[in-house]
């Protein structure tokens, strides 16, 4: 009996120590903290249910602007033509892109109500960046892999869906036609129109 009790205590202590070590690694990993802060904002936005896309966007806008490097993301999404735009066009596109990106994620968040966000407590190096691995589950327990590419400034510069589908690359593909048809002004209209459509969409019954 004493042997069994001693074994159980040892197991409990080892689990406690492992948990503390995991917490310590997360606390020391600035890239992980960035994603944890972001997910805390998502969870707060969903604590009273899904609400509307507009209310979710208002709730997550602050954490997303704090966590994402939107200026770097829009430059990559636009591509080489970015350098040909005036500073005023670049500024307007950066702001419009941020609002569009926030609205996109606010729309997707409706699927995560009642679910959970799990963050791996230690990131992996990828060149000068870090990759933070996470899984997002819905209320039915169906989960997806979502990885965040965090730059040396500890800001997210890309999101990898299912481990390899680049969010920024997908945006670049969707921006190609508006850019070809109307340049900076065409893309600006595209971003603003899409954002407005997402924020005014009626919740699914």
Image (cartoon, helix red, strand yellow):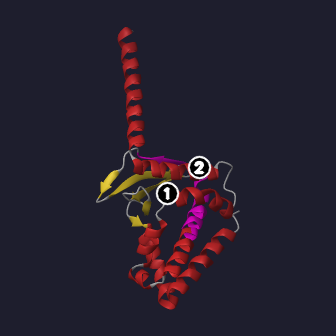
- Calculate the distance from the C-alpha at mark 2 to the C-alpha at mark 1: 15 Å
State whether residue 139 appears in this view: no
Q: Position of residue 89 (x, y in %)?
A: 52, 81
Q: Is residue 139 above or below residue 61?
A: above
> Magenta includes 106?
yes
> Magenta includes 1?
no
Q: Position of residue 203 (x, y in %)?
A: 69, 64
Q: Position of residue 96 (x, y in %)?
A: 57, 74
Q: Going 59% across and 60% down the picture, which residue do you hit?
A: 61
Of callouts 2 and 1, which one flags the residue occurring earlier in the amino acid sequence? 2
Question: Could you tell me which secondary element the residue under label 2 belongs to?
Answer: helix
On the image, numbered disc 1 is attached to which residue? 67
- Dot in front, 2 or 1: 1
Q: Is residue 41 above or below residue 157?
A: above
Q: Going 47% across and 52% down the picture, which residue do you hit?
A: 35
Could you tell me which quadrant the N terminus lies in? top left
120 relative to 107 in the view: left or right: left
Taking the view exactly as shown, the residue that stands out farthest to the front is 87
Question: Could you tell me which secondary element the residue under label 1 belongs to?
Answer: helix
Residue numbers of the magenta segment: 99-120
């Amino acid at each position: 009996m004493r042997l069994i009790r001693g074994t159980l205590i040892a197991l409990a202590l080892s689990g406690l120590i492992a948990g503390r070590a995991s917490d310590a690694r997360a606390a020391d990993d600035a890239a992980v903290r960035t994603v944890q802060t972001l997910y805390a904002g998502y969870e707060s936005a969903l604590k009273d249910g899904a609400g509307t896309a507009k209310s979710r966007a208002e709730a997550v806008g602050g954490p997303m602007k704090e966590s994402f490097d939107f200026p770097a993301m829009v430059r990559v999404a636009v591509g080489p033509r970015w350098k040909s735009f005036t500073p005023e066009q670049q500024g307007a596109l950066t702001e419009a892109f941020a609002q569009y990106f926030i609205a996109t994620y606010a729309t997707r968040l409706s699927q995560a109500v009642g679910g959970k966000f799990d963050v791996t407590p230690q990131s992996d190096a990828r060149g000068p960046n870090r990759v933070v691995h996470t899984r997002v589950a819905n209320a039915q327990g169906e989960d997806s892999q979502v990885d965040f590419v965090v730059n040396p400034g500890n800001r997210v510069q890309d999101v990898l869906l299912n481990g390899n589908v680049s969010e920024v690359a997908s945006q670049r593909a969707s921006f190609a036609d508006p850019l070809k048809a109307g340049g900076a002004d065409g893309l600006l209209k595209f971003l603003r129109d899409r954002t407005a459509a997402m924020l005014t969409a009626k919740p699914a019954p």
